[in-house]
Amino acid sequence: MIGSDPFEEELAVDSVSASPSTHSGANSESADTTHFGYTDVPKQEKERLVGGVFDSVASRYDIMNDLMSFGVHRLWKRATIDASAVRPGHQVLDLAGGTGDLASRFATRVGKQGRVVLSDINASMLAEGRARLENEGKVSGIDYVLANAECLPFESNRFDCITIAFGLRNVTDKQRALESMYRVLKPGGRLLVLEFSKPVLPLLEKAYDVYSFTALPLMGRIIANDADSYRYLAESIRMHPDQDTLESMMREAGFERTGYQNFTGGVVALHKGFKL
Ligand SMILES: C[S@@+](CC[C@H](N)C(=O)[O-])C[C@H]1O[C@@H](n2cnc3c(N)ncnc32)[C@H](O)[C@@H]1O
């Protein structure tokens, strides 16, 4: 495992000021605490705990993604690219972009006149993304920016398209992050949020629960020697706002013509919104 163990640190946090959550969903946050999976932690602690998870999983992230989703994450991401309407010459921000799945495809789409920014808060994930794009021979027209989605270091009205895939649920203040994205998007630009969501069929939800809380940590233990990070993954998915709640948060941030599309029965949803 690379880096410190976030779960040991979580226990340390627990013993001073955090209390176990009742798993009652995203609304059980208070002014001072937020969720780290099923645990309530002080808001200022979450970023460090999430950082520990992604330091730990960075080197095995891509292989684990393929195994855990049976490769289906590639289809969800292809649908996101198709929904982006990104064209040659566009400026694209792939936020919480990690190992660069989306950024790599956008780099091909925007051509020589366009620009792609791959941004992430985590240096280990960003380094994996950079190495991957460089291995693919994608070296020009791409910037790598270490940044927190809550306070983006870009000028206002810059990007034609912003994507955030499987990143938003890890962000401490999601509303602030959506507002920051709105600011840096051009008028007419679109935001695409690809994220785990709420399955629409009760039977699917049950099967998905069993899979998430048994198979995922087991795979994490066997392949990445890290069950805890994959337990956090399952818990963080359950605590993330459902489809309608996320859509209303986007509207509150200023986005218009919002909507979403469920994939795989709502296991994942793609939210879309425009700055008009
Ligand atoms: C599950 S990975 C997703 C990576 C990639 N987008 C994908 O779809 O494969 C989540 C990413 O969100 C990043 N992240 C977490 N909190 C963040 C924040 N506040 N701002 C920006 N990135 C963040 C993590 O470092 C991690 O790389």
Image (spheres, rainbow, N blue to C red):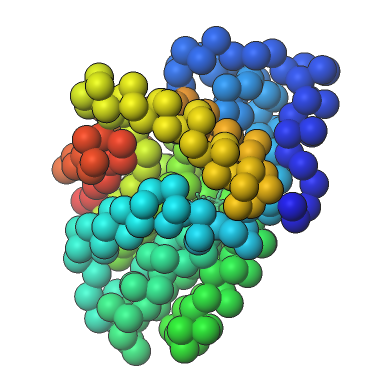
Residue 70 % position (x, y): 36, 52
Q: Residue at x 34, y 89 (%)?
A: 112
Q: Residue at x 61, y 29 (%)?
A: 36
**Residue 33 left/right relative to 276:** right
Q: Is residue 187 above or below residue 225?
A: below
The residue at the far top in this view is 22
Q: Which residue is drawn at 52% across and 49% down?
A: 149
Q: Which residue is drawn at 54% across and 69% down?
A: 129
Where residue 197 sits, quadrant-wise, is top left
Residue 202 % position (x, y): 25, 19
Residue 186 % position (x, y): 31, 61
Q: Is residue 187 above or below residue 47?
A: below
**Residue 217 left/right relative to 187:** right
> Foreground residue, 188 or 200?
200
**Residue 165 left/right relative to 131:** left
> Foreground residue, 1 or 260?
1
**Residue 6 left/right relative to 145:** right
> Foreground residue, 225 or 87?
225
Evaluate whether residue 47 shows in this view: no
Evaluate whether residue 103 shows in this view: yes
Q: In this view, does 54 lie above or below 231?
A: below
Residue 82 % position (x, y): 20, 63
Q: How many labels does the image show?
A: 0
